Image (cartoon, coloured by chain):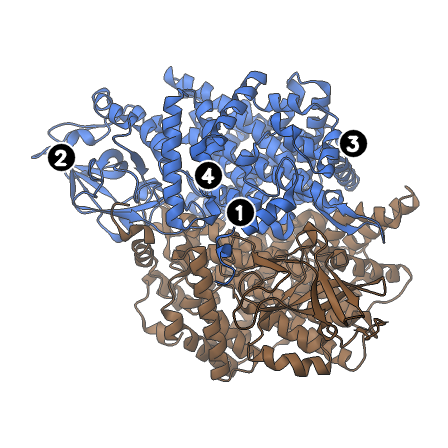
Chain colours: A blue, B brown
Amino acid sequence: MAASKKMNVNPDLAKERSKATFDVEQLTYALYLGKERTERKRYLEDLAVNDPVIKECKPWAFCSREEQYEMALKKHIHIAKQIKLLGFTDEWDQYFYTEAAACHENSPIGLHSSMFLPTLRKQASEDQKKKFLPLAENMTIIGTYAQTELGHGTFIRGLETTATYDSKTQEFILHSPSLTSMKYWPGNLGKTVNFCIIMAQLYTKGKCHGIHTFLLPLRNLQTHQSLPGIELGDIGPKFGYGTNDNGYLRLNNVRIPRDYMLMRYSKVLEDGTYVKPPNSRLSYGSMTLIRAAIVGDSSRGLAQACTISIRYSAVRRQTEVYPGGPEAQIMDYQTQQYKLFPLLATAYAFHFTAQMVYGIYLQVTSQIEEGNLDQIGELHALSAGLKAFTSWECSLGIEVCRMACGGHGYSHASGLPKIYVDLTPGCTYEGENTVMMLQTARYLMKCFAKVENGEKLPGFVSYLNTDLSAKSCMKSDVALDCLVQAYEHRAARLVQVAARNIKRLVVEEGQSQQQAWNNTAQQLVWASRAHCHTYVVKAFVAMVTESNLDDQVLNVLTSLCKLYAVHGVMEHLGEFIQDGYLSTSQVEAVTGKLMALMKEIRHNAVALVDAFDYPDALLSSCLGRYDGNVYQALYDYAKSSPLNQKDVS
Amino acid sequence: MAASKKMNVNPDLAKERSKATFDVEQLTYALYLGKERTERKRYLEDLAVNDPVIKECKPWAFCSREEQYEMALKKHIHIAKQIKLLGFTDEWDQYFYTEAAACHENSPIGLHSSMFLPTLRKQASEDQKKKFLPLAENMTIIGTYAQTELGHGTFIRGLETTATYDSKTQEFILHSPSLTSMKYWPGNLGKTVNFCIIMAQLYTKGKCHGIHTFLLPLRNLQTHQSLPGIELGDIGPKFGYGTNDNGYLRLNNVRIPRDYMLMRYSKVLEDGTYVKPPNSRLSYGSMTLIRAAIVGDSSRGLAQACTISIRYSAVRRQTEVYPGGPEAQIMDYQTQQYKLFPLLATAYAFHFTAQMVYGIYLQVTSQIEEGNLDQIGELHALSAGLKAFTSWECSLGIEVCRMACGGHGYSHASGLPKIYVDLTPGCTYEGENTVMMLQTARYLMKCFAKVENGEKLPGFVSYLNTDLSAKSCMKSDVALDCLVQAYEHRAARLVQVAARNIKRLVVEEGQSQQQAWNNTAQQLVWASRAHCHTYVVKAFVAMVTESNLDDQVLNVLTSLCKLYAVHGVMEHLGEFIQDGYLSTSQVEAVTGKLMALMKEIRHNAVALVDAFDYPDALLSSCLGRYDGNVYQALYDYAKSSPLNQKDVS
């Protein structure tokens, strides 16, 4: 960004920057864990966006689906080669380099490194690793992870693909026994990969042992032609992900050797004897990591959308504020502030939450390595709920950002639709959000049962011991601790309401536990949402109360933190006041504070998005440019539209 | 639909239909104003979807942008020809025929009939009509309506394009004086049209007279080449609307004859003398019609999305309800019901609202023709607010429907993304939604001032006279009249809160009226939203209490109506209870009723979407098919993906 600051900047935007009350660099360092890491990030981003191969790629929006796929394949193979060539072994190095080079163009080889390799490393036996890892690491074998089927998604036990052991030949026979059992959706499966890890119901000696993982060759390693018994292809155009050949795969009794089953934990012996894994919860680890990563992805997507819409709101002018006066910057309208500033606060809140959850993940993983599985359930509940909570909020929020840019937000020139279609699948993949919320609710119900037994709960759920008859301490200053207490009260109350409703249905109406659960499911989702919301508020509060930032940065982050919490109270007001926890005058104080906080944020809004430090090339947005020259950029975008190659079409 | 009922239907879906408690045909007749009109609609739809030219068009999702445009141009020219050939002069005939033929593929010649011709008919003088209408009607002249500029949208007075009268040559000089003055976004402008109606600031005798409308030739009528001084083209790829060449237009001192200014109301005489229009509010009419039409479009888009997601939810099975049991239809999950059934109720609510608003439009228009302008303000406020309220709700709702279909919703095979990108621009065009809400708020503030003066208000706003100290009459049966009163109370209270806040800021804090307005803007939006919400609830209640439907239909519609109202209370609970209007136990009764209503709707859900009576071809959805054979359809869709033309790409 340093170089770009010398550019010719739109005067409205320059003025915004001059009004900031804090040093943007200091906040950027806080976001990216220090000056050194920030500089490293910038170095990697510069390298990526100035790479001649990346730069010469035709703009994504001007490509047909087929061109998008080919262009992305070329780009991502180049990225993979560069990462190797430049020796980027650190995962953050790889992340920042790839993000800036790819700009929300989903990778046609991404599943290889995000799912195929890690699964191989975690679930293959030592012998298998020796055999397959070198081939996978040098990309002779390119793989994906084939789990989802045409008729089966989040409920993994329902998968239909079979792997039947034939002890005569010491092979597994992989088969799709029905239309709905066909693999459908796995990324990169259609055209790109030549191998996959496939989930299938294991049958041996006539008995089903449930879902296991197998290595399956799909295409000839030389000719890339699909192998006999294997029918596969791309699933067709989607809302986004045009660059990704999400695929389908139908298997007609395909035989693979016995040692193509991943055997680190479960085993099938030569004679077909099945050997159980020592602990069935060991596979939780990678699932929780991916879900924790979605929290981070969501926060970054929302932060990018905020950057675009807030910069544009400083440049765009509309409607005289008084007759005959100049048209105002649209960011001066309270309604525009109400759309964007809470989302800006949300992006910050989720950023800190993602960092915190990742820290917990590392801690729990190291416990697991030492054989301590105590916190697996807690981590699972946390990552499931937060994945759902944040991906929903970001999905909604990005669209609010888009519409806050008026008509121009609808053009691909804005970059916003691309961010949306890239992020919104996060609500569905790696566990559908409602199912995730209910998994968190299940944990909360277990915890609440302990509360009813008089136990004191530790950690994230200790607030469930709260005395629900207490009233809020909220005063006109709207203090952070009173806000935290309000969130805890709301969540604890909703957990109690849901638990009691289940009990009532079972005891008074004679419903089964399952029926009662389903008939309380929406209330359980509300309870989970309130729990996750509380966690995020507390993560943000911890950041502003426990870190040693400079005072100016701390002041503005504290305002943002309050805005996040206060806005959440207003948007879910019923849940906070239904039992009289907040009085009418306390609600009025919160409303007043909300409006006051937007004024406080107003003069720092542009600086706050600048601090996210996204290069223009990553945003790929005519509206979100650092220099604010949006109208010239829109005109240039229009002129380059392929439809304009001839005056008369 | 009659013929399709004989097809091989998925057994789950067939069972759903057998469970319905009402005659679907009767409800369809109620929706489309009788049996005769319903049959006419079906006749037109059949004709459209079985037309060989329409049928042979390549599926939209498999086309590049350029192919999309060309295909749509061919299709829509064919539609226009057929409408003429078949003699469809009735606007509903044209609507249903076109909707079924076009299936959310935006028309590259649509602005000609929706904006160019009506404006010509309304604003041209009799001489101008004689000269231009025949050419426009036989499509020698194809036009659009060029209003929006690169830097100027909803605030029309801010437009920069100039039309300067030169009395020497008796011409207007049309000019784009700046980058931001370039026309940008008008539909069909880029490549298709050869004429436009253009809005520009009229200057004559050195004085600006504000925005006026002019006819501007853009392209040679023979060669279609753009004319000298005119730079125009397509604005490039967008989120959707790939079939529409939304365009840009830059003018370099282009001269047009004096009689190319539309002169029915305002005039410029030969010597440059400006003659004012008799009444500046006369142009309100067409604006309100278009906004009322958006209410209808929104309801239809949402109804289509509900049809797809509810049928799919009956076919899709996921997760055992009890261990070892069969996987349940996802529609049996309360959380799925909570996503979809309130939206189903919303689609019905908006359908009846759209019909009611259209009726009011016709009534007010005939008053205007008789010179009575009394109700213009009221109609304007109503159509502005409802346009915003319904387009926002539908935009959000369609995405909820999409995500409720899990991963498959993300594929273009679902048809859902196309409906979304076709409908969501309705939040922005014809008046940005927040601006619309504030226009309605302005009307509400005027009305409230009258209330404070002790006046009794008539019509839609009479509820503002409500005594706000009264408590709710809500009992455990959750009666419709108590629900209506609750909505009226909430809206009246929020109007009062906003009005008093403005007053306080002016009187106590010394702010100008404009400052106080802006500092209350979000509260004004809340008040407007509550007002519109109340109007919709009352429109639905009127439908179920005043119409003479058969009892079974009436029963199910009454449940839907209650669900709409009860769900709205829960989603905006804070606004209903902040002042203690509903007690804690009343809120519990409403919550209980909400859950009970979902069970009531459950067994009629498929029948309720069937009643919307959308042909499969219009839905263009593998998931929403009448026969429920979704998995085969998805597989066929995948196989036909252009990326699969070769095994090895």
Q: Specify the subunit that label 4 lies on.
A: A
Residues at discs 4 and 2 both on one chain? yes
State the mark number for residue A171.
2
Tag 4's secondary structure?
helix
Callout 3 touching callout 2 (CB < 8 Å) = no
Q: Identify the amino acid type marked 4.
A: Met
Q: Nearer the viewer, residue B372 or A272?
A: B372
> Residue tagged by mark 1?
A417
Tell me, for residue A475, which label it has, or none: 3
Asked where in the image residue A482 lies, by quadrant, the reply is top right
The amino acid on which the numbered mark 3 sits, given as a three-letter code, is: Lys
- Element type at mark 1: helix
- Up-down relation of residue A590 to residue B231 (above or below): above
Q: Nearer the viewer, residue B165 or B536?
A: B165
Disc 3 versus disc 2: nearer the observer: 2
| Cα–Cα span, label 3 and label 4 | 36 Å
Whichever of labels 3 and 1 marks the residue nearer the N terminus, that label is 1
Residue at mark 3 shares a chain with residue at mark 4: yes
Residue receiving disc 4: A436
Say which label, 4 or 2, has the lower sequence index. 2
**Do circles 4 and 1 both sit on a common chain?**
yes
Q: Does residue A7 show up? A: yes
User: Quick check: B404 left or right of B274?
Assistant: left
Number of marks: 4
Secondary structure beneath disc 3? Answer: loop
